[in-house]
Image (spheres, rainbow, N blue to C red):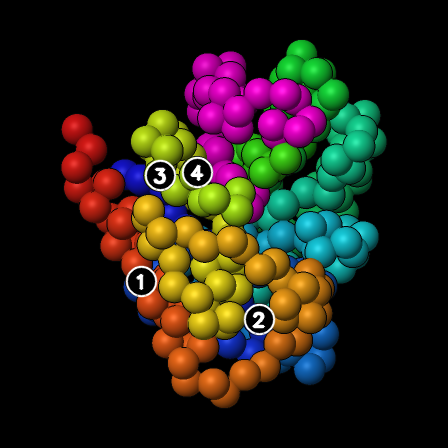
Amino acid sequence: MTLALCHIPPASLTELLPKELSHHLCIADVIIRSDNADYARFYRRQSQAGKFVILDSAAFEGECTSPQILSAAARIVRPTEVVLSDDPTSATRTLTMSQECSRILRERGYTGQFMGVPHGKKLREYTQNAADLVEACGISTFGVVEEIPETLGIPRAEAVSVLRSLFPSIDIHLLGVSEDLNELTDPYLLQQARSCDTAKLIVWGLQKKLVAPGNVPPYPGRKALGGRMQYFEYVTTDVFAWDAAIANIETWERALCAVSSEAP
């Protein structure tokens, strides 16, 4: 078994996603917008079909998603897992926010899994926050952020290794990938992480840039498509852009399948 990719498309472009994908991630703030009914319907259908659907906040996009928005979106999508609220600047605040979020979601009828996102300024604080999230919120998965090298001063794979050794029963999800996509070619991460989410392959494709192992061009960022949150409003009927995005997804899905088949 190897890492499953959750590709993040604009709200109107879920058709870019191959039907055989096993894992998906959607954004609560996008789900609850009335003009994104097709986006919400798509992820609800994935959940109904037995796919693993993760419901995330728009924290990466710069939004402060409330537990109320998460619970409202959860009622619509019926996700397998919800990412609990966190504060990247504070382990203490992360624990408080995650506890409140998990309590509100349970009170409002959500019965699925929780993903906790530990934080800390030092590795010891980070692992203590992880332990607190397990005990206080009953999480099933750790979300490991892309910024680990900047915040902890260690490679992301090292943080995953520490979490796996301390909490062997808790799954690992990689929140985002770096611009060089090194996580998608790291043998250790490919075997130890359950899943990973990214919009990057689609962003490159919508800019008509092909990406493959060993051929990773400079990443243009979502700003090229309006911005982090505006990305979800992006619309195009450009056949070449669609084809490039689909090609990028298929290229990396094949690459990951090849790694899986070669694993001992």
Q: CA distance from mark 3 to mark 1?
A: 15 Å
Does residue 135 show up? no
Q: Amino acid at mark 3?
A: Thr
**In front of the other: label 3 or label 2?**
3
What's the residue at 51%, 76% (across, down)? 13
User: Any mark on residue 185, and which?
Assistant: 3
Q: CA distance from mark 1 to mark 2?
A: 18 Å
User: Pointer 4: what residue?
Assistant: 183
Does residue 106 show up? yes
Whether the residues at callouts 4 and 3 have beta carbons within 8 Å, the answer is yes
Q: Amino acid at mark 1?
A: Glu
User: Any mark on residue 10, and which?
Assistant: 2
Most distant residue in the bottom direction: 237
Residue 37 in the image: x percent, y percent? 62, 79
Q: CA distance from mark 1 to mark 4?
A: 17 Å
Graded by Cα atoms within 10 Å as few (under 14), some (14 to 19) or many (20 or more), the crowding at tag 2 reads: many
The quarter of the image holding the N terminus is top left
Q: Amino acid at mark 4?
A: Glu
**Extent of the magenta region:** 148-176
User: Pointer 1: what residue?
Assistant: 250
Q: Who is closer to the viewer here, 257 or 165?
A: 257
Residue 166: in magenta span: yes
What's the residue at 39%, 42% (across, down)? 184
Whether the residues at callouts 2 and 4 have beta carbons within 8 Å, the answer is no
